[in-house]
Amino acid sequence: MNEISNHMPTSELQRLDAAHHLHPFTAHGPLSEKGVRVITGAEGTWLRDSEGRRILDGMAGLWCVNIGYGRAELAEAAYRQMKELPYYNTFFQTTHVPAIALATRIAELAPGDLNHVFFASSGSEANDTNLRLVRHYWARKGQPERQVIIARKNAYHGSSMGSASLGGMAAMHAQGGLPIPGIHHIDQPDWWGEGGEMTPEEFGRARARQLEEAIREIGPDKVGAFIAEPVQGAGGVIIPPESYWPEIMRIVQEYGILLIADEVICGFGRTGEWFGAQSYGITPDIMTIAKGLSSGYQPIGGSIVSDEIAATIAGDEFFHGYTYSGHPVACAVALENLRLLDEEGIVTRVRESTAPYLAEKWATLADHPLVGEAATRGLLGTMALTPDKARRAKFAADPGTVGLICREHCFAVDLVMRHVGDRMVISPPLVITEAEIDELVTRARRALDATL
Ligand code: PLP
């Protein structure tokens, strides 16, 4: 009989966790020595832990709980759907109402002619779909040699072999023999970290032109697609200079290569529009979605593709799919999440009030001696930390100062932020209030002060 529950002493839960649970992206030795934090519940923007502490969640879980915690409507949608039809596949000539309804709603929300959805259970799976889909598409167009996909260094597109290869994280590539063949990485548009003497606008254009150089080097007839996040999230919330995306658009159009916007973080209101592509005037051929699609209440992701791609691949079977593609419960929950985001005006509120408010308050952190750059886009925030602002110097690598601030000092003030390299980032639930933004910024400053 399994008695493990929230009522157990924290130390016993920690012991069992250390004994049996392998955590993602974690060094288990140090974690078990320190003792993992046990999260027991959540409401709105606040988490509770097993010690009874209330923690301000500056990360919406893992960039995903857009609607906030504790929405009974989503639980009820899951319950209703589980009773009605807990599972059926969408392979082999069958479908069901939740998948039809969700695909239809996504097509309404997505920009341009992105009208067709291939479902997966996560962003990683969706990007694996994209990898195969792009190559299949070009084969169907009679150009099977268009195999190469250009991506960016320091991007995150997932953890599977395909999606981690599309990603540009050196530490991930170093484990497990990545990247797989046919993927080429160009530099990211991180002006603070890499811009040197250039203005942001010059730098944005220069970084975009690396795409053109790469296409010419590889051969325009060999490149199938370029994939990028509108704002690079897990890489440290790298907000591109305004000149970056228009130049990228010019290049993909000139060379006729597909553009995949990975909207796993930027999608569903994070940037103040339904999709990051709309914030930047990008017209992708494919968008990757996950996370905010269900606000993390159910695992679901997908690839939204254009009319032209859907028509091109319609003729023969695409040998690809997941048992849980279009899972009815996940679809029902996602649909309810989209209804609430829309009917409660949450995306509009981000655009018109919370994002401008966060931008103003977050910018005040730039006067802190450790902060080089403090910037936001929608409800994404980033701080580049530095021991010397004038030289834009870097701290020692992880686990250095920035890791310490996040792991110890944010912890001490009951605030969840993440650190990536020399940056600290936030991505709170979209329902965060102005008072909670004040609290978040105050706590972030206290965590920084504790480091001095
Ligand atoms: N793409 C982006 C931009 C992401 O941020 C993530 C996850 O953080 C993924 C893809 C992978 O999604 P998942 O963790 O659901 O597989």
Image (tube, rainbow, N blue to C red):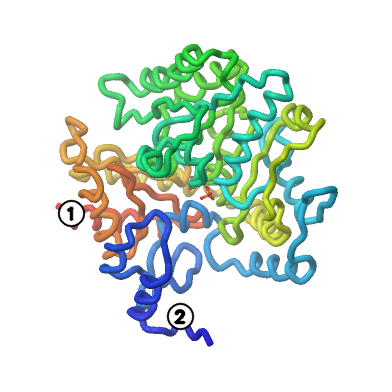
Residue for point 53% across, 31% down: 227
| x and y, in percent, of residue 321 in the image | 69, 46
Q: Amino acid at mark 1?
A: Thr
- In this rendering, the answer to whether 319 lies above or below 391 is below
Q: Looking at the image, is mark 1 or mark 2 earlier in the sequence? A: 2
For mark 1, what is the residue?
451
Classify residue 381 by image quadrant: top left
**Disc 1 packing (10 Å; few <14; some 14–19; many ≥20):** few
| x and y, in percent, of residue 412 in the image | 26, 65
The reply to whether residue 56 is in sight is yes
For mark 2, what is the residue?
6
In the depicted view, which residue is nearer to us: 6 or 30? 30
Q: Secondary structure at mark 2?
A: loop
Residue for point 50% across, 25% down: 245
Drawn side of residue 256 relative to residue 366, left or right:
right
Drawn side of residue 195 relative to residue 176, left or right:
left
| x and y, in percent, of residue 119 in the image | 68, 47
Classify residue 135 by image quadrant: top right
Residue for point 48% across, 46% down: 159
Classify residue 81 by image quadrant: bottom right
